[in-house]
Image: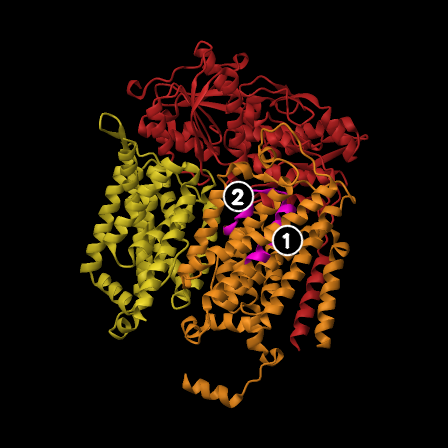
Chain colours: A yellow, B orange, C red
Amino acid sequence: MITVQACLDGILLGVLFALIAYGMALQWGVMNIINIAQGDLVILGGYIAYFMYLYGIHPAWGVIVAPVIMYFVGVGLYKLVINKVVDRDLFISILATFGISILFMQLMNFAFGADVVLANSGYGTTFLFDNNVVLPNSKIFSAVVSIFFAICLVIYMKKSKLGRAIRATAQNARAAKILGVDTEKVYAATFGINAALCGVAGALISITFTIHPYMGLPYTIRSFMIVIVAGLGNLPGVALSGMGLGVFEEFADYILGTEFRIGAVFLLLVLILVYRRFKLSRKREYLK
Amino acid sequence: MNKNLILYAAILIFGITAPFIFPAFKVQLSILCVLIVLALTWNIQGGEMGYNTFGNILFYGLGMYLCASVQVGMFFPLAEWTESGGEKTFVHTPAQFFQGMAVGLVVAAIIPTIVAGLIGYAILGLRGHYFAICTLGLGVAAGEISGGIEIIGAGQGFTTPPFPNVGGLEARGEFFYLLSFGALVLTFIAVRAIYSTRFKLILNAIRDNEDKAEAMGIQTMKYKIIGWMISAFFCGLAGGIMGGLVGYIDSTDVAFDGREMGVFMVLMAILGGKGTLWGPIIGATVFHIFKEGFWTFFLGWQYVALGVLIVVIVIYFPEGIMGWLREKYPERFGEVIDEADRKAQVELK
Amino acid sequence: MKINKIILSFISAVAILLSTSVVSFAKVVGDKIVLGAAISLTGKYSSNGVHTQNGYNMAVDRINSMGGVKVGGKTYKFEIIYYDDESNPKRAAQLAERLISQDKVEFMLGPYSSGLTKAIAPVTEKYGVPMVEANGASRSLFTKGYKYLFAVLAPANLYLDVAIRTAVELNGGKGVRIAQAFEQDAFSQDVRLGILDAAKETGSEIIIDDKLPKELNDMAATLVKVKQMKPDVLVVSGHTKGALTAIRQIAEMKVDVPMLAMTHCDAAKLSKQHGKNSQYALCASQWHKTLTYKDNFFKDGMTYAADFQKEFGYDPPYQSAESSAALLVFKDAFERANSFDQKKVRDALAATNMQTFYGNIKFAPGGQNVDKPMVLFQVMCDGAGKCENKVVAPLKWASAKLIHPIPKWSDR
C-alpha cells in the first residue's frame, strides 16, 4: 500500500512541478534564458494566495489572482533586467537571475516576515482502498488546476496570435523579426506568462504545503531538471518527467529517509546530465 | 623585471605585517585571503578554460570536513567527538593541535584533488550551461548528503578543535592569518607559473573553440581534468583553513555553502575581470570591502544591496575591473593598437 | 609594466581604508554599558531572531527607565550593538570576532539557535568575554567546558523528556512505542537525544526514527509510516516549519495518535494558523505567561505579556521572554560584581541565584540553567474554534488537565 500511496503522492506533486517546469521550458526555448529566480517567483505567488487567505478570501481564488499579478511582475522584471541579458551568454543570465533571486528572497523577508506560513483550504481528505491510501483533497485540487492551466496554455499557444508569435520567435528570432514580429514584446509576454505560471504554482503550493521566503531554489532546480530530461518544447515530456520526478522523490523519502530527499534530487540531476553526456558523446563518435 | 620584484616584495611585506598593523582586522584579512584563493582557482576554470563552474565549492567543503576530521581523528575517536550527547570532553594539546592541523591540511588538499580527477571525466564532458548547472547540483547534493552523515556530526554540525592556549589572545588570529596568507602566496605562485606555460594556452584554446583544439590534436579532456585538479587542490586547502578559522562546520551553511561562497567566487572573479591574473585578486578585495561595508551600514539590507550589486556587475561590467581598465588604458597593459587595423575592423563590422 | 602602478596604488588604497576605518567603542562609554549581539535579522531564523531582539530591547528599555545598573555608586545604562548574522554560523563567528576585536565589546548576548551559539562560543571563550545567551539549548554547548558561557534556558534534551514520562505514566508505568521525526539541525537533534535517553530509562521502544531536511515542506512519508505502525506517541521537532508542516499534514491525512508532542508551537503561532486542527498538540516550552514567577522589573508573566503586546503588537513567545531574562541576569551580575572586570563579572554570573518573571536562574558548572523546569502546554479549543495554549505539566502550574489520549479524527 505504501507503494500506491507513494506513487499517487508523487504524481500529484509531479504535476505541480511540471507546471513550473513548463514555464522554465518556455522562457528557455524562446529567450534562451535560465531563470534561477523561478523558485522565488513561485514563492511570491504563494504569498499572494496567502494574503488573500489572511483577508478572509478563500485561497483557491489565488489561483486566478496570483497569475494576473505575477504577469505584471514578470513583465516589469523583463523591462528592468532581463531584456539586458537576453542576447548574452547563458551564463550571464544565470548569474543575473541569481542576483534577482537573492533580492526577491530578501524583499519577501522584509515584506512578509520569515515565518513559515500556509493557507488553509479547508478541503477534506479522500480515502482509498479501505483507508490505506490517503489523499488530501488539496493535493488533488492542485493537480487538477495545474493540468487545467497547462491545457489552456497549450491551446493558447496554438490558436492565439501572440502564441504563434512566441512559437515563431522560439524557432528563429531573427526570421520572426524580419517577418514583422515585435520580438521585444514577445519576450516580455513570454516572461510574463512564465511568471504567471509560477504564480499559479505558488498559490497551489501555499494551499498544499508551506511557503517561506528562502524556499525557492529547490523548485528552480527541479524545474530545470524536468526540462533537461524532457527537452525544450515537449509538453507531454515535461508532464511525464515531472511526474517521474515526483514519484522518485516520494520513493527516495521512504527508502533513503527524508533527510536525503533533496540530496537525492540534486544527485539525480548530476546523474542525468552525466548520462546525457555519455549518450551524446557516443552519438558524436558515430559521426566520425 | 626589477619593478616586478619591487611589487611582489611590497605585497609580501604588506601581507606579512598586516595583522600586526591592523590587529582588529585579522579575521577579515584571513577571510580575504581565502576568498582570493577561491577566486584565483575559479578563474582557472571560468576565466581561462571557459567552464563556468559552481562546483568548486565541493572541494572547498570536502577540504573543510577532511581537515577537521583528520585533526580530531588522529588523536580521539571521531564519532565520540561529534556526538553531541557525549559527556566526555577531549582537549588537544598544542602539539596535537598543530600536528593534526598540518596533516589535516595535507589530506584536505590531496583528497579533493583525487576526487576532481575521478569525477572530472564524467563532469567535464558537459558543455556550457549544462556544466554550470551540473556543478551547481553537485555542490548542493554534497551539502545535503553530508548533512545526513552521523560521523561528521550530521545536522548537529562539527565543532573543530579549539585553538590551544598558547601565545596569548591574539595568537589564534595571527596563526590563521599567516596560514591563509601562506595558502594565498602558494596559490598565486602556482597560478602564475601555470599562466606562463603552454598549459594556459591550451586552456585558452579550449575556451575559444574546444572542437578546433581537439582537431588540432590536443587531448582536451586531459588538460581540463588537470586544470580542475589544480583548482581542487587549492580549494581543499582553503576549505581546511576556513574550517579551523570558523570553528564550527555546518553542512549547508559553512562547508558546502554554494549559495554564498560558491557564487561569491564566481562574482569576485567576474568583478575583477576573468581571464586575467590580477583580476580575481582585485575583484575579491573590492567585493570583500563592499560586503563588509554593506554589512555595517545596511543592517539587514545587505542582501538587497548584494542582489542589486550582482545584477549591476553582471549586466554592466561583464568584463570586470581589469577588462574596463584594459579598454580604457590599453597601452598600460602592453597592448599596441594598430590604428589602421582597428579602423579596418570597425569598417568590416 | 604600468599595470604594476595600478596594482600598487590599489593596495595602498586598501591599506589606507583599513587604517582609517578603525572605529573604537569602549565597553563603558560615559554612562553606557555596551553589549554586543549577533542576531538573525535575515535568513531562515529571522522570525525567531526578531523575537529575540524584541526581548532584548524590551528589557534594555525597562532596566534603563527603572534606574539602570548601579556599579561603584554610579548608574549606567545598557546599550546593545546589533549585527545581522544572516542565520549563518560562519557569519556569526566572524561577527563575534568583529564585535570583540573591532567594536571592543566586552560582554555579549547570545544569538538565536543552538547552531549559531555553537559557532560563537569558541570565540567568546577564547577572548574571555562573558556571554549570557538565551536561545542556544543544545546540550553539547554545556559539555565543552566553556567557562564564559551562561544559558538562562534549560538544555534541549529536557524539552520533551516530560512528555515521554507523562505518556509512560498514563500507560500504567509500562514503556510506550514512540515515533519521532527531527529536523537536521543542532537543536532538534539534541531534543532527539533527550528522547532517546528518556526512552531508555522508561523502557520505551522507538519504532520510527526519521530525520527531516532543512528545506522541509512535506513529511507525508513519515506520517504514512505512523499510520501503519500506530505508535503511542509521535514526537516532531523542526523549528516553526516542522510544527506547521506536521499539523497540516496530520490533519489532512487524518493520522490518529494518542499523543502528539512538538516544539516551537508558540513561535509558529500554531493555534492561530491552524485553529482547530492544532487542537490537543502538546508543546514543550521554556516559559508560559501563566507561570507564577516574579521579579521587580516585569512583575510577572502576565504583566510581561501585556507590556510586550503593547510594545510590539503580538503575544510574546518564550524566545522573547528568555531573551529579556538574559539582561536581568547581566544587570544582577554587574551589580554583584560591582566592577566591569570581565573575570569578576564572570564569577558573579557563575554565582547567580535569582528569580525573574521567566523563572529561577542558577547556573550549573557547564553554564546551563538548572533551576528551571520545562513546561508542557496543550493546545485546547472551545466550541467556537478559539484556541489557547494551556499549561498541563508540571502539575504545579497546570491550568488545565491533560487530555489523553487524543480523540480520533472520526470523533472530532
Residue holding disc 1 = B31
Query: Height in image: C14 above or below A201?
Result: below
Q: Which quarter of the image is occupied by the C terminus of chain C? A: top left
Residue A96 occupies quadrant: bottom left
User: Nearer the N terminus, badge 2 or badge 1?
Assistant: 1
Q: Residue at x 30, y 73 (%)?
A: A174
In the rendered structure, the answer to whether residue A145 lies left or right of residue C219 reads: left
In the image, residue B254 lies in the stretch drawn in magenta? yes
Q: How many marks?
A: 2
- Same chain for mark 2 and mark 1? The answer is yes
Residue type pointed to by label 1: Ile
Residue type pointed to by label 2: Ser
Tell me if mark 1 has few (under 14), some (14-19) or many (20+) residues whose alpha carbon lies within 10 angstroms of its own.
many
Badge nearest the viewer, 2 or 1: 2
Q: Nearer the viewer, residue C282 or C399?
A: C282
The percent coordinates of residue A136 (x first, y second) are 28, 33
Q: Residue at x 68, y 23 (%)?
A: C364
Q: Residue at x 34, y 53 (%)?
A: A195
Q: Does the CB distance between marks 2 and 1 fall below 8 Å?
A: no
In the image, residue B163 lies in the stretch drawn in magenta? no
The percent coordinates of residue A221 (x first, y second) are 39, 51
Q: Nearer the viewer, residue B61 or C360?
A: B61
Residue holding disc 2 = B251
Query: In this orientation, does residue C248 appear?
Result: yes
The percent coordinates of residue A109 (x first, y second) are 47, 45
Query: In this orientation, does residue A124 appear?
Result: no
Query: Height in image: C149 above or below B227?
Result: above
Residue ranking furthest to the right: C72
Chain under disc 2: B
User: Which range of residues does the magenta coloring cover?
Assistant: B232-258
Cα–Cα gap, marks 2 and 1: 19 Å
Local SS, label 2: helix
